[in-house]
Image: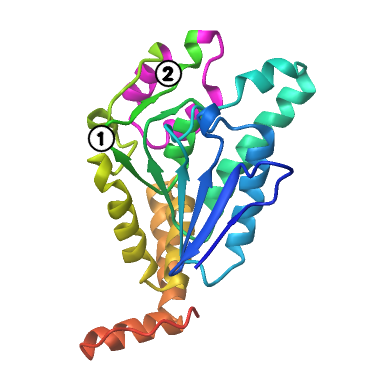
């Protein structure tokens, strides 16, 4: 196991821990409810890119320290640095973070508690899976302060049905975990004292699979989403053909037929 702060001047605002093939990245700005400053966004991108190259890491968990998962962008930082160029740089970098999560070979699980609002809700919607404490609340409240949640909308509308997404975006109202599960924003809601065990159990289960297969499947999942039905089947058929030729597929099938645990080689 390794546990260390990500590189940052002064107080570590992002923590990284690796154990049994699972990397946990913890947003560490608890007094700011883990608001996404430009520095934190940049550090997240750097850590994720590093993890993407590390074949010993099979799953990533994204968590928040303190009372909340993430309250969105750092509004104090935004108001202290007005100007089109600065705004463009911030939202471009935030979009890069979301794309980095989606393109990462490893599955990413959001461990959510407290609140996940605006860009914090966007993070939850972007992660491949999300488990939340049952007291968690979610919102895209930008409309309440004259700033429509346009970039969070991109991730939200790819996870949540159109009518539910529009209601969240137009009202800015908080929703609880029951609605978040029903809407498709999160996978499940659990009692707060069971959150860590549930996330760790899910991460361990996924980490036990072939890392090559996980990477192939995650990439294929997102690529086929925007294809026509015919194109999606043609693409998926090609992916399965190439996957079948991998050593891990041969090993997995042989292990299943031989009634023994597979030994993954990652190739």
Q: Residue at x 47, y 72 (%)?
A: 212
Q: Residues within 10 Å of mark 1 (few under 14, many from 20)?
A: many
- Based on the picture, tell me whether residue 157 belongs to the magenta stretch: yes
Is 39 on the left-hand or right-hand side of 59?
A: right
Q: Earlier in the sequence, mark 2 or mark 1?
A: 1
Which residues are drawn in magenta? Answer: 145-170
What residue is disc 1 on?
134
Pick out the residue farthest to the bottom.
Answer: 258
Instruction: Please determine whether, in this image, residue 49 is positioned above or below residue 92.
Output: below
Magenta highlight: main SS: helix
Work out whether 199 lies above or below 70.
Answer: below
Say what secondary structure mark 2 lies in: helix
Q: Nearer the viewer, residue 14 or 260?
A: 14
User: In x, y percent, where is residue 55?
Assistant: 55, 71
Q: Is residue 262 above or below residue 214?
A: below
Magenta stretch: includes residue 38: no
Q: Picture coordinates of residue 42 (x, y %)?
A: 68, 42
Residue 261: mark: none
Q: Which residue is mark 2?
A: 169
At 61% across and 25% down in the image, what residue appears?
A: 74
């Amino acid at each position: 196991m390794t546990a260390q702060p990500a590189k940052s001047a002064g107080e570590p605002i992002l923590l990284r821990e690796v154990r049994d093939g699972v990397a946990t990245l913890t947003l560490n700005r608890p007094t700011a409810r883990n608001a996404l400053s430009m520095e934190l966004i940049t550090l997240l991108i750097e850590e994720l890119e590093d993890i993407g190259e590390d074949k010993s890491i099979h799953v990533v968990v994204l968590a928040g320290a303190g009372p909340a998962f993430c309250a969105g962008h750092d509004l104090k930082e935004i108001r202290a640095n007005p100007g089109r160029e600065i705004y463009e740089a911030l939202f471009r970098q935030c979009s890069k973070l979301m794309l980095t999560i989606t393109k990462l070979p490893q599955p990413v699980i959001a461990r959510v508690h407290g609140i996940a609002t605006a860009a914090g809700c966007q993070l939850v919607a972007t992660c491949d899976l999300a488990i939340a404490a049952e007291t968690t609340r979610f919102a895209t409240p930008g409309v309440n302060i004259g700033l429509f949640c346009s970039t969070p909308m991109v991730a939200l509308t790819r996870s949540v049905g159109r009518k539910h997404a529009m209601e969240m975006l137009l009202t800015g109202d908080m929703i609880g975990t029951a609605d978040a599960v029903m809407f498709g924003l999160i996978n499940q809601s659990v009692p707060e004292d069971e959150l860590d065990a549930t996330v760790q159990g899910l991460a361990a289960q996924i980490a036990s699979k072939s890392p090559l297969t996980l990477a192939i499947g995650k990439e294929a999942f997102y690529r086929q989403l925007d294809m026509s039905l015919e194109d999606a089947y043609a693409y998926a058929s090609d992916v399965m053909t190439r996957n079948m030729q991998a050593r891990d597929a041969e090993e997995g099938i042989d292990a299943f037929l031989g009634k023994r645990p597979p030994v993954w080689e990652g190739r």
